[in-house]
Image (spheres, rainbow, N blue to C red):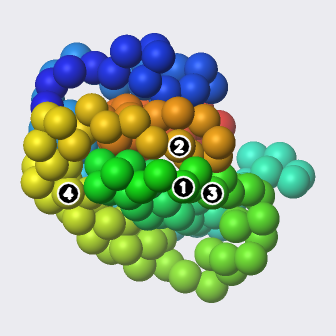
Amino acid sequence: MTKRPLPEEFPAYFTKYVDLVPDGDITTILAEQLDVVEKFLDELPEDKHDYRYAEGKWTVKEVFGHIVDSERIFGMRAVCVARGETQSLPGFDEDVYVTNADFSSRTLHDLFDEWEALRTANILAVRSLSERALSTTGMANNKPITSNALFWVLAGHLTHHLNILAERY
């Protein structure tokens, strides 16, 4: 699937993520991000894993834990929409999720392993979906969105947070 989602395929607040994704095949882009993340984390000094750049901001582990949660949630939403789910899928409060996750007790390597498994599953999911399934519109957080758009949001969301980590941490 190489079709960039049209603005009407997703809520406007996801534009900042979709705009960060280069043109191309979304399965290739998602797969390439596996190497990008692994390289990024390999180059991150261990003494930065629990670092937060300001009081009240997330640590590197918490940011990456949020990436893991988002990978799981956006991927699940994409499959649900593709399968024709008619109920609005729930939103999530990322601050509450991070607060309740205790990411500080885990290693960054462990979080990467979990994310890598989820990303691999999402790549397999998008490859398994027909053009029709990917263009299916469903509801997430009471807003219309296509399955295709959710995969693009997933890629852009990761890029967004990697940019923040690179700039502030």
Q: Residue 35: x and y, percent?
A: 21, 50
Which comes sooner in the sequence, label 1 or label 2?
1
Q: Which mark is residue 125?
A: 4
Which comes sooner in the sequence, label 2 or label 3?
3
Amino acid carrying label 3: it is Pro
Q: Quadrant of residue 9?
A: top left
Q: Quadrant of residue 130?
A: top left
Rounded to the nearest angstrom, the CA distance separating label 2 from label 4 is: 19 Å
Residues packed near mark 3 inside 10 Å, few (<14), some (14 to 19) or many (20 plus) = few
Which quadrant would the N terminus be assigned to in this image? top left
Residues packed near mark 4 inside 10 Å, few (<14), some (14 to 19) or many (20 plus) = some
Residue corresponding to mark 1: 87
Q: Is residue 58 left or right of residue 11?
A: right
Residues packed near mark 2 inside 10 Å, few (<14), some (14 to 19) or many (20 plus) = many
Rounded to the nearest angstrom, the CA distance separating label 4 from label 3 is: 20 Å
Q: Is residue 145 left or right of residue 34?
A: right
Tag 1 near tag 2, CB within 8 Å: yes
Amino acid carrying label 4: it is Ala
Question: Residue at point 53% right, 63% down?
Answer: 69
Residue corresponding to mark 3: 90
Amino acid carrying label 2: it is Met
* Front position in the image: 23 or 162: 23
- Name, please, the residue furthest toward the right: 55
Amino acid carrying label 1: it is Gln
Q: Which mark is residue 139?
A: 2
Rounded to the nearest angstrom, the CA distance separating label 1 from label 4 is: 20 Å
